[in-house]
Amino acid sequence: MADINTVATQFTDFYYTSFDRDRASLGPLYRPESMLTFEGTQHQGTSSIVEKLQSLPFQSVQHKVTTLDAQPSTNAGAIIVSVTGLLVVDGSENPLQFSQVFQLVPTGGTYFIFNDIFRLNYGA
Amino acid sequence: MLSSPSPAPSGRSIAANALRKAGLMDRDRDERMRDASDKPGGRKGAQKSTQRARAHPHRPRAIDAITGKDLPGASNASRVSMLASRLAAGDSIAIRGASKGTLGRLRRNAVSGSTSADAATESKVISLWKEFVHRRWNPEAKFLNLERMAEDDYIRRNALVAPGAPGSTNKEASVIFKIASKLTPEVETMSLAHNNITSASTIIGLPRYLPKLVNLSLEGNKLRMWKDLDYIAGRRGRLENLRELVLTGNPIREVEYQNNRVDQYKSEVARRFPSLEILDSEAIAKIAFDVPQASTSTALPAQPAATTFPCEMGPSFLTGVDGSIISNFFMRFFPLFDNQRSALVDAYHPDATFSFSANTAIPARARIEGYHHSKEMPNQRKLEWSPWLLGGHGGSRNLNRMGGGVEKMAKTLHIGNQEVVKAMSDLPKTRHDVAGAPEKFCVDAFPVTHGDSMHLFVTVHGQFVEEPAEGIRSFDRSFMLAPAPEGSRAKQSGWDVMILSDELVVRAYSSHEAWRPGPMRVQAGEPFPPSASPAQLPPANAQAQALLQEALSSIPEPQRSLVMQICQRTGLNVAFAVQCLEGNGWDLERAVANFEQVKGTLSRDAFL
């Protein structure tokens, strides 16, 4: 098992790059048991989560990670990843501040997102 | 005013010229006036306008052509108007350094610098403007309607110079705004539509005298350039609450629309008034719900499940778990974290992990709001990042910044309850006011299943005071909690849960406005904790409460809880709350956000 810091870094790189390019492409990262809470609303399962992500009311988005932290979770091999950063929506010059926490669970040599908790911390 | 450079000719200079011409003022007095204007507040503006006034010493005044019929004679009429200008000039001299000067004081100062005959006329002018303002004032609506002033019979009859009329300066408007600032209730809405205003310099007194104005119409004026608007742009303490602005019919808007630069136009305006929600009768962001449509859809969402429970430490239930666990945990954890970190050793699992990272970026808006450098928050400057970046036996763990420093990565992850507490004890002392100000915290929490065992995944966002600087920081913190097993040290120490992992991000303060409070809520379908519901409804009489309860009772769970939250948070009545939720897929936060955008367009009967 790769070290958690490497996994966390690679994961966030991949996740946000994919998110910013094509939100639909995030589907394979989730499983039926995955749960997203987005600003206090709960979405369970791949299709529901991807639908939520795609319904977000902006055309283009760019994530800029400011801090990234990771810890081993209690579940064997799982990782808790905590991110804060900036969300540049539709090219606005005033980025929004966000905080996002993932729990990544290993599965067949890779990881899936078991939990995903997203909050905006501050408006632009 | 004097402290702001104004391209408009100075009323004082014109008045002085005119007075001298009329033989009503001697040279000494003119000098005296100019001296006053050259004092510190005067700066370039006064000088420039003096020059400009010199270049047009005989600038015609519309007022000269108007005969005031109820006044003794035409010459008197023009004197009245000149005095009005001078009066306003006197205002800026007299009031300098006392921005909240009262009208009475204005009058006294005006009197002290004049002959008694002038003084009488001056106070008459003030009375005339006062009378005018009161005629245009609708206290019920808190609305001061100053549309088409130059066309008003009263203005003409009394030979007053309306703001924006030829020969006017910013002084007339300032006199009006100053009078308006004394109105009760406070002016909330003002229309300055159709006054031929070519530059907001004419109304530069507005932000000063009416800093809390909510709605402003400048419709049908002649504002052309962005710099024309800059004179009244919102800044700290000035027009910070402006929610609605109308610029329809001004070249500044119409030209942009013709050139398909609508977005740029909107963003230019929004940039100048950050609080603005409605521009030219449109919500600035373009999400809308179909407001007054009759509800046709009765389809209910499968399971609108809310997992947010903003940290109101009330009793609640989590599926299969005692819901007060989270609140009990926070109410015990944070006071100990603040006062006695070493005592937390039993709250952490022997293999628990803890790490923290510092996000030192100051959000642009927080900077603008003065959350980091302002008189109101003097302690923010005293905060230092070094204890968070370097302290805690290893420093900030930001994998984004480490560039492969394996040793640092290992050092910044604290494993085992002893190590955890040791690291924490080296961090700055904090004060989390979880009990006193629950609205400043926001919690996401839900159970996660790990094999046979169930854990709680809790994320809390909020703020704390950092000692000794006494400044405020924001933080995000994620916990993985497990029920404390019987016989464990945690259980023996009175903890229902123990911490398996704890991840803390400390950020520059950014206020809690991103999460408004709502009642604690764990899963859809369950009733609200009794203590949280009726007490939080907007204060209303018993009858209204009864009506509300009745309307609510017809709505099935789990929707009822959502509807109630919307009612509480927005003041919408039940019917509109239902529509708002339907229009937003029964997503509470979306519905509230949507409401915030369109609330200005809702009629009164949408509300409780």
Image: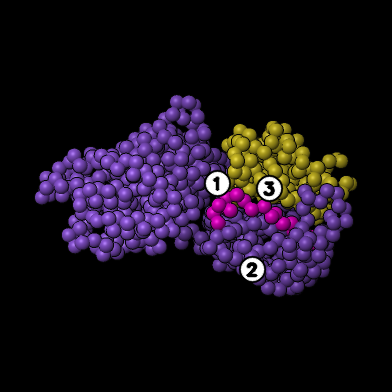
Chain colours: A yellow, B purple
Within-10-Å neighbours for mark 1: few <14, some 14–19, many 20+: some
Badge 3 amino acid: Gly
Same subunit, tags 3 and 2: no
Residue B121 magenta-drawn? no
Residue at 77 percent across and 58 percent down: it is B396
Looking at the picture, tell me which residue is in the foreground, B554 or B64.
B64
Mark number displayed over residue B469: 2
Badge 2 amino acid: Ala
x, y (%) of residue B140? 29, 52
Q: Residue at label 3?
A: A85
Q: Quadrant of residue B414?
A: bottom right
Q: Is residue B158 left or right of residue B551?
A: left
Element type at marker 3?
strand
The magenta span reads: B350-370
Q: Would residue B422 be seen by someone viewing this image from the given angle?
A: yes
The relative height of residue B441 versus residue B226 in the rendered view (above or below) is below
Q: Earlier in the sequence, mark 2 or mark 1?
A: 2
x, y (%) of residue A73? 79, 54
